[in-house]
Image (cartoon, helix red, strand yellow):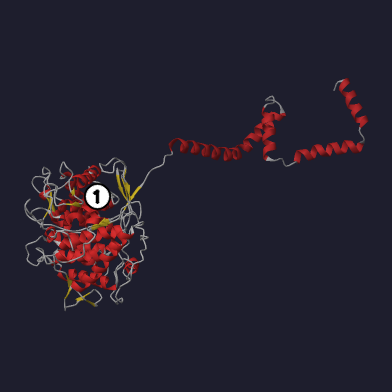
Amino acid sequence: MSEELENEVEEIVEELTPEEIFEQHRQEIAERFEEKGFFKRLIEMFSGLSKPKNSREYKLAVVDLQRLAAPLMAILLPTLGVIALIVITAVTGKSKDVVQIEVARAQTDQEELTEEQEPEPEIEPETPPDEMIDIQVDTPTINQVDFADSTPAPSNEPVSVKPASQDSVAIIKSPVVMKSMAGSRNPGMIGRLTNGGKGYGDANTEATVLKALWWLKATQSADGSWATKSGTKSPLANTGFAVLAYLAHGETPSSKNFGETVEKAMQYLIDAQYVDNSGTVRFKGADGNEYAFLIATYALCETYGMTKNPNTKTAAMKALQRIVDSQSPTGGWDYKMNKASTRDDLSYAGWALQALKAGKMAGMHPKGLDECIKKAIKCLKTRSFDKGSFTYCANARYHRGLTATGCLAMQLLGFADQPEVRQALDYMKEWRPSFDAEGMNTATPKDCSSPQYYSYYAAQCKYQAGMRQGATTSDQKVWQTWNEAMKKLYPSSIKTLPEKVKGPDGKEHAQGYFENKDSFSTRPVMDTCLAALQLMVYYRYLPTTQTKATEVESETPAKSGGEVEVEVDI
């Protein structure tokens, strides 16, 4: 040691007492055993790494770096991961629109006739349920109208078996969107809407419906179809009508009493479809004008909406595409789906549009569907409407009993607030449900050759107008008057048979059928289904404008002009 360094040490030692030297020495030892925190060690480590490599501080820092590597990675890696996720989400995140649909139904028919002849409905079903479907269908909050309650005392007749769930389906976003149009068809809702009064049904109407359903079950053929009394009409159309009636009541293949009946009928419709040598989709057992093709398609669409059976969807899609492709250049349809004809038969178009609507609400979207619907609306407004009512076809301004067909078609497609619908409702104001032309109280009985055919449509039109939110007092009273007459007419007109029908549990049930007084009186299946469907109007569909059911996003030619956004249910 140099002399100067020795002198400095001596000076320091001379300045400190032995106790102070001991305390300093103790603190130095204590510092070596002190438990340093993570961040303090981290700071000392980085400080040491900055020292010369041959220094003691640097070597200690390297050792600490090895010890702290694991804790550092445990903090660093998750932090980097979170940052990366935030960046990816910010760059790629996009919202997606989902359009919901449901389900609804309809029904009717007409027979082949020349342009000079009176039209005679050949065959007809009802409007589809929504269904959308899927989508669970919401229970409608129907406008409460304070109608007089003239309901008979309830009976002990059972309501319905709990139906399979009805799902809504998200489909491709398109110019025409239909949502939440189907009513609730579960036993609880049926019971609530058939408890009498206030514009609804009662125990007698529901008992009448069940008689008809049991009669259909008893008269079904082994192959799943329904023949006609004379055997001259279409078993395909009859089967379509029967399926629509069962579905309207919430009956599916899973139903206790009618499940087997519905399943056999569904399979008959699927098996009846074929493709001919020209590549055209057809159905066996159809009539000459192919009304039955439209009715069978309608039934298949509604069946898929309520059951989601994939085989049903395949058959329905093929049939729907032919309907779209067969539309005339002017927007209507004609016998045999003759695309070249511009006759624009409204009775025929009514079934085509009900089938297309049911298919779309069930989530099926054949090519060209949206443009097809827009053209159909234009045709209804400009070619089928004349002097306050809808007529048989564009070139024959008669048979104004079809006013109800055109009116309902516009309500179905979301145009319930259009002036044509208002005028049509006024035209039908004095109509009453009836089995003969005079009983309908029409201004022109000769234009009412098939009263039950027109009553089927009129019941739905008046229900839609009178039970919607914001309904006028006049529309409410018109519906109440019609409903009271309907609740008296049909229960008293059904032909109840003495034989009972046994259910799966061995219990016996009453059965009955309806028979019209027009040219279709040889077809009790169609007659029975038309009447039963009228008595199920309370729970089949939501009243128009109850919910935002249809929106037309692209311009549709309309006398009122502009974009149309209407709420529908049928």
Say which of 257 and 425 sits in front. 425
* Residue 413 horizontal/vertical position (percent): 26, 50
Residue 455 seen from this side: yes
* Residue 361 horizontal/vertical position (percent): 28, 52
Read off the residue under disc 1.
420
- Residue 410's place in the image compared with 51, above or below, is below
Please name the amino acid that badge 1 sits on.
Glu
Say which of 556 and 65 sits in front. 556
| Quadrant in the picture for the C terminus | bottom left
| Quadrant in the picture for the N terminus | top right
- Residue 434's place in the image compared with 309, above or below, is below
* Residue 406 horizontal/vertical position (percent): 21, 52
Instruction: Tell me which residue sits at (34%, 50%) in the image.
Output: 100
- For residue 31, what is the image quadrant? top right
- For residue 10, what is the image quadrant? top right
Residue 308 seen from this side: no
- In the rendered image, the residue lying farthest to the bottom is 498
Mark 1, Cα crowd under 10 Å, few <14 / some 14-19 / many 20+, is many
Instruction: Tell me which residue sits at (31%, 77%) in the image.
Output: 153
Say which of 339 and 114 sits in front. 114
* Residue 172 horizontal/vertical position (percent): 31, 44
Say which of 424 and 238 sits in front. 424
Count of number-bearing discs: 1
- Residue 342's place in the image compared with 8, above or below, is below
Per the image, label 1 sits on a secondary structure element best described as helix
Report the side of 47 relative to 289 (left or right): right
